[in-house]
Amino acid sequence: MYTFSKNLKTFAIVLMVLGLVGIAYGFFSAPKDIAEVKQILTEQAHHDGGEHHVTAADHSVADSADHDHHAEHVYGQLKNKPWTALYVGCIFVMLVSVGILVFYAINNAASAGWSPVLFRIMEGLSAYVLPGSIIFFVILVVSVMGGNHLFIWADPAVVEADHLIAGKSGYLNVPFFLIRAVIYLAGWNFYRMYARKQSLALDASGDLTYYKKIFKASAAFLVFFIVTESMASWDWIMSIDTHWYSTLFGWYVFASFFVTAITVIAFVTLYLKNKGYLEYVNTSHIHDLAKFMFGLSIFWTYLWFSQFMLQWYSNIPEEVTYFIFRIQEYNLPFFGMLVLNFLLPLLLLINTDFKRLTWIVVMAGTCIIAGHYIDFFMMIAPGTVGGSWFIGVPEIASLMFFIGLFIYVGFSAIAKAPLLAKNNPLIEESKHFHY
Amino acid sequence: MSNKVIHALYNDDDVLLHAVKETRDAHHHIEEVYTPFPVHGLDKAMGLKPTRLAICAFIYGLIGLSFGTFMMYYIMIVDWPQDIGGKPSFSFIQNMPSFVPIMFEMTVLFAAHLMVLTFFMRSKLWPFKKAENPDVRTTDDHFLMEVALNTDEESAIEFFKNTGAVEVKVIEKQL
């Protein structure tokens, strides 16, 4: 039985407090009116010097109405910035915990023999799905009710002026959007609660009917999940760039948070093993998790490239602007993310023996988690803050807050049940698993 | 010097694995084990050195990637630049995304084929090669362990009978 250590609890609370302070700072430091934005813009023009003086001179020739228009535009972006920071951190950590739940469901539905010693970790960490989705839903409601401008299709004035968005309003309208969100989130939470309950009952009684129930529920959940996840990724991420669409976006988002989820499972397993728990977990279990990290990193790259290459090649304005804008305004994270999510995991984890070394797995995992946060940032921020982006205090603080909450909720749930699902019929195979 | 060997036949892979461990513990020298299918963990039980085929595969992959890159550069940029879909091929880096599938396929092609060829050469399998397995049953349902005979025959046969062999023969090996 694991006890939530005092040090880790303090660490989680410190993360949350610092995160909250940073988020508040983000909202507080956002400009209050257009005048403030104009001042920021003039300061920027003065700071840059050289080349920009020419453009500044050009601007002075252009009429002041254009100038005002630009300032208003930047004002909208800067007002969105703290919201974007909050939203990206919230959806990323929430989907990672959903990914852990999905990995649990896959292992149950596949009757995997290697993984049951890790089931309690997955069950524990996926406890975050409930608080995570509640906070996320609150942010969604605030966003579409006019609290911010993340979803431009939720603004009636924008829809009226844009016939492309107006054409999508049968799907993208506030009531239907919220109803869908409730269905997705409720479905995922229902499975998590049901599976956890049956798993604990199986442990208490040893009655295999509970095992069969988990198996059936997992298979049904996976079908429900892959449909709802795909739609959720359109709703919550793709609809931010309302004009743009990609037919494999659901898979792309899934690959991104799924590989991060498995990395998190590997991290927590290594942490608990290091603390002297999980006596039955051996290097072969770590090896298998690392194989998933390696394989899914390549899978993510495959989807990323498939999405990019076809649109880059066909060069259709309404599609390719999505990538042109990212390459121009987000050059470093756009290409840096490929190094973090593909190149480094590929080279670090390709060797069989390396997949068993803790420090290699931790190093590759750190790249994967950082890279996929940037990936989520890159999916959302260009549509909400445009060129006025920066990964600074509000962004990192938001991530810190949600990671702190994730650690707190996840480890509290791990501490509530024995670390070994001892009556799982496959537990013996899992204990003796070797490569 | 004697070139007699013992052929111990088994009809179960678990029994074989166990026998291999016992034989090594008794300091007999295992020359070869013939099995109808790959037996998981046999290489470790026999104490074989880990394969270096994976390192070869990685190097072949890199060669394939370089070759694919060079090939596309030569074909599409140097030798015959074309304007395809409004993307004129004057610069490799700007056209690179459309070459990625070919570069990837070349990596896979080189890694896979050269790895198979390396494996064939390393295991001395070439065309018209005569089969080495001493008993046809090893292609069906029997496992054969070939052990150098360095003690007296009687006790060796007794030893291998005890490891669970269904048949033990002493063979004069043709060199």
Image (cartoon, grey):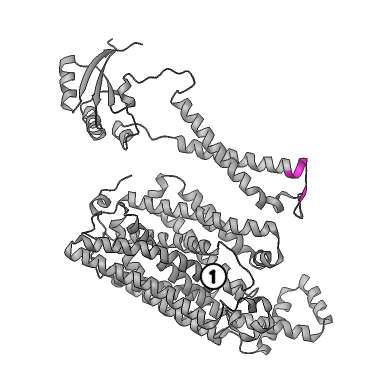
User: Is residue A45 placed above or below A329 in the rendered structure?
Assistant: below
Would residue B76 be visible to someone looking at this image?
A: yes
Does B81 lie within the magenta span?
yes
Q: Amino acid at mark 1?
A: Trp
Where residue A339 appears, as percent x and y from the top left, is: 56, 56
Q: Does residue A357 appear to the left or right of A336 in the view shown?
A: left
Q: Secondary structure at mark 1?
A: helix
On-image quarter of the N terminus of chain A: bottom left
- In which quarter of the view is residue A201 placed? bottom left
Q: What span is colored magenta in the figure?
A: B76-85
Image coordinates for residue A34, horizontal then vertical, percent? 67, 88
Instruction: State the residue at coordinates (48%, 38%).
Output: B55
Q: Residue at x 18, y 61 (%)?
A: A206
Q: Nearer the viewer, residue A301 or B70?
A: A301
Q: Is residue A10 above or below residue A263?
A: below
Q: Kindly identify which residue carries mark 1.
A: A234
| A5 displayed left or right of B59 | left
